Amino acid sequence: MVQPFGARSSIKKRSVVIGGRKTSVSLENDFWEEVRNIAQSKDQSVVDFVADVIKGYEGHNVSSALRLSVLEHYRRKTEN
């Protein structure tokens, strides 16, 4: 059974080390799951994926950049 969107998606803060610098990222559990899935589909670690996202979304905070990246990923998939 599929849970309604957000039913299990409380925000959780995690720390990641990017380029030797520790940063904390607050994302809903659903977004973290998709970040892991996307990273795995690209044969990347989560840290490498996050580092790539940060490069592409300069000027955004890391949490927002990851949300936008997940959204963009699935928009592209639905366009094909």
Image (tube, rainbow, N blue to C red):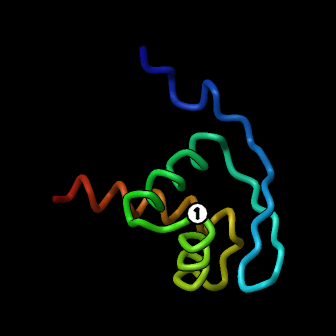
The mark tally for this picture is 1
Please tell me how crowded label 1 is: few (under 14), some (14-19), or many (20+) other residues with Cα within 10 Å.
Answer: some
Quadrant including the C terminus: bottom left
Amino acid found under the numbered disc labelled 1: Val
Q: Where is residue 43 shown, x and y percent of the image?
A: 41, 66
Q: Residue at x 52, y 83 (%)?
A: 56
Above/below status of 44 relative to 74: below
From the viewer's side, name the closer residue of 6 and 30: 30
**Residue that protrudes farthest toward the top in the picture:** 1
Q: Which quadrant of the view contains residue 75?
A: bottom left
Q: Where is residue 57 shown, x and y percent of the image?
A: 57, 80
Q: Which residue is drawn at 28% across and 62% down?
A: 76
Compared across the picture, whether 16 is left or right of 77 comes to right
Q: Where is residue 71 shown, x and y percent of the image?
A: 45, 57
Residue under label 1: 46
Above/below status of 33 relative to 71: above
Above/below status of 56 relative to 61: below
Q: Where is residue 7 shown, x and y percent of the image?
A: 61, 24
**Residue that protrudes farthest toward the left in the picture:** 80
